Image: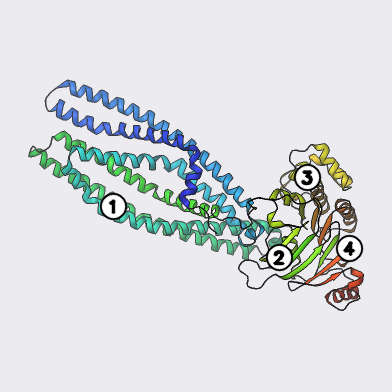
Amino acid sequence: MKGPNQTSNLLRIARPHRKKIIVILLLTVGWSLSLICGPALVAYAIDQGIRRHSERPVEVAVIGYFASALASGVLFRQVVRSVTNTGERVLQELRVSVFNHILSMPMGFFDSERTGRLVSRMTTDMDALENLIQQGLVQLVSNALLLLITLCVLLIMSPILFLFCLISVPILAAASVWFKRKSAVAYMSVRDAIAQTMTSLQEGLSGVRVIQAFANEDVVVRGFNGQNRAQLLANMRAVSISARYFPVIEAMSVFTTAGIVGIGGYMSYQHLIPIGTVVAFALYMGNLFSPIQQTSQQFDLLQSAGAAFRKLDSLLNIEPPLAEATEPRELNAVGAICFENVTFTYAEEAIPALQDINISIDFGKHVALVGPTGAGKSTIAKLIARFYDPTIGKVSFGGIDLRQASFDSLRRTIVVVTQEAFLFDGTIASNIRMGRPDISDIEVYKAIEEIGGQSIIESIPGGIGANVFEGGSTLSAGEKQIISLARVALIDPRVIILDEATSNLDPATETLVEEALTRLTRGKTLVTIAHRLSTAQRADQVLVVDNGIVAQQGHHDELIQVPGLYSTLNAAWLGVGGSKLD
């Protein structure tokens, strides 16, 4: 679903700075008027001073010229400072707005959107806008006003010569329309190519261990080179369009100036206009075509920035499909999780991932979701956490439809613990207090003690003050899991969804983490996506999911006595001495 259009987004971002924008426009008008004074003073000196052999008009013109030049320098400096400062502040707010919007999107958005593309929006597209602000925005704004004011002055000075200037307008207009149409498409292709290159780079960096493990460097580099070449070709197409447009502007400038000198000279010889007016007109051609030429030279920058903003705008216009209710409700402290006639289909997929699910999970119980890969276990867990909304039916907690719950209440009540604990750059303490950033170190220690993880944390040099690098690369899997569980303990949710967090740990560490889980989940509802039979054996209830339906449910001891998928999985496990359920 699309939200506001591009213009409304731009106005929304610029609205808080409208006073500064008005001041910038006034300063730019003043700067443009100071430039306009020069040729007019030259005409005055020639017609009133030189031709009449009078010194006074020449002296006045010289003084006025120096004054206008000084004013031009002062005003232009202020324009540059004001435009740059305001533009950078708008850009800063845009970065925050885009990043906040990305974080507000549900999990389904990230399932279909490449990380590299989002990184490209926040880096290369933002860089294109910053280049416009730093290098071209002042010229674009000032040249537009200078061109407009110059046209008005030329019309007043000599309507006949002004009409001759208009001869070039149709050619300039046709060339500009062609350039705008072609370059817009070309620069959008450039932005897409850059995003693809960034995606390839991001995947290569994220999967560098796998790439090196399988000696696949050459294949990955060839893939990156292909994306890089596509970016090169897109840039070359954009440059070729500019190379055909700019010479037209230059040729029309030379042609029009030569015509003005010829026609104006003849009219002056016939005493139809003063010679000073002809000279002023010739000088004004610089004010007329110089802005066009400079703007044309900045068109690459403008089109690149325009394409970048359209990409960012399209991202901002994506409305999160999971909207908070108009009058959100607080979830109850306790309650059963209920699925009522729930069917769910992922976007762009025809076959439902879940079909007509009706289950109830009593509060304080441990439920294990069991089934083969792709059966729908993770989908059930995602619906409980409201990462998605059901296509049909409803999911409720304590009798309240999750779609009616406030996001804050939902995230405080239901928490997901993933199999791979993700840690952020910072300290152990900052990672633990992520859900409650205002708490003290004492409370952080209490959360660690609550799950019995103090021995693991204390074994790390620096304790909770130890630095954690990106992804927790310097910590073991067990240490990362303890930090992740302490983070959950600090929030103290009512429901914990666990993507079996101990399946990749060594036995000793697994015991410590399982003890921490036992402490953490005491008195809470625990829903586990079980990958091992031992987990299902300990659960109060087992839900056997197969092909999007709950095929069986009950306790482990009951299910192994009944012919079905669960008893088959159990027999296979006992037969091979393994422990995997999927």
Relative side of 12 to 178, left or right: right
The answer for how far apart the CA atoms under marks 4 and 2 are is: 43 Å
Mark earlier in primary sequence (2, 3): 2
Residue 214: which disc? Answer: 2
Is 66 rendered above or below residue 516? above
Q: Residue at x 19, y 36 (%)?
A: 279
Q: Residues within 10 Å of mark 3 (few under 14, many from 20)?
A: many
The answer for how far apart the CA atoms under marks 2 and 1 are is: 58 Å
Query: Whole-percent x and y of residue 522?
Result: 88, 52
Nearer to us: label 3 or label 4: 4
Badge 3 vs badge 4, beta-carbon distance below 8 Å: no
The answer for how far apart the CA atoms under marks 3 and 4 are is: 29 Å
Q: Can residue 462 be seen by looking at this rendering?
A: no
Question: Which colour scheme appears in the figure?
Answer: rainbow
Q: Amino acid at mark 4?
A: Asp
- 116 or 396: which is nearer to us? 396
Badge 4 vs badge 2, beta-carbon distance below 8 Å: no
Badge 3 vs badge 1, beta-carbon distance below 8 Å: no
According to the image, label 4 marks what residue? 540
Query: Whole-percent x and y of residue 317?
Result: 53, 54
Mark earlier in primary sequence (3, 4): 3
Q: Amino acid at mark 2?
A: Phe
Residue 432: which disc? Answer: 3
Q: Residues within 10 Å of mark 2 (few under 14, many from 20)?
A: few
Q: Amino acid at mark 3?
A: Ile
The answer for how far apart the CA atoms under marks 3 and 1 are is: 63 Å
According to the image, label 1 marks what residue? 172
- 164 or 349: which is nearer to us? 349
Mark earlier in primary sequence (3, 1): 1
The answer for how far apart the CA atoms under marks 1 and 4 are is: 78 Å
Is 41 rendered above or below residue 543? above
The answer for how far apart the CA atoms under marks 2 and 3 are is: 35 Å
